[in-house]
Amino acid sequence: MRFLNIVITISLILLYANEISIKTLLFILCSTLLLIFANLQNDYFDREIDAKKGIRRVILSPFYQFL
């Protein structure tokens, strides 16, 4: 969530300073959310495939430190 908070804060500051439009703000937020959820879904399927193969391991992704 930290990464999302940073993106939202920067986007709102730029919107307030009239540097970007509302459409651009929505595009930035939607793109960020899609990337975060795609990464989470990818990790879920990787774990599911490993479970089917009988591999037991803990995978720590460095991306999660920004959530």
Image (tube, grey):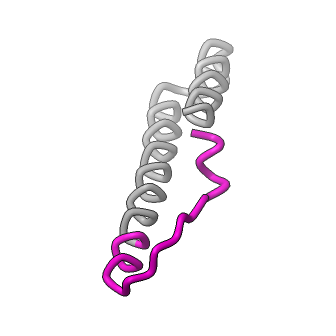
Q: Is residue 55 magenta?
A: yes
**Is 7 left or right of 55, judged from the image as shown?**
right
Q: How many marks?
A: 0
- Looking at this rendering, what residue extends furthest in the top direction? 16
Picture layout, residue 32 above or below residue 50:
above
Q: Please identify the quarter of the rendering in which residue 43 is found.
A: bottom left
What residue sits 59% from the left and 48% below the top? 64
What residue sits 36% from the left and 79% below the top? 49
Q: Position of residue 25 (x, y in %)?
A: 51, 31
Residue 2 or residue 60, whichever sits in front:
60
Residue 52 or residue 40, whichever sits in front:
52
Residue 27 or residue 19, whichever sits in front:
27
What residue sits 62% from the left and 21% below the top? 9
Q: Position of residue 45 (x, y in %)?
A: 36, 70
What residue sits 35% from the left and 76% below the top? 51
Picture layout, residue 35 above or below residue 65:
below
- Looking at this rendering, what residue extends furthest in the bottom direction? 53
Locate the C terminus by quadrant.
Answer: top right
Q: Is residue 56 magenta?
A: yes
Q: Position of residue 58 (x, y in %)?
A: 54, 64
Magenta segment boundaries in residue numbering: 46-67
Q: Position of residue 48 (x, y in %)?
A: 34, 72
Locate the N terminus by quadrant.
Answer: top right
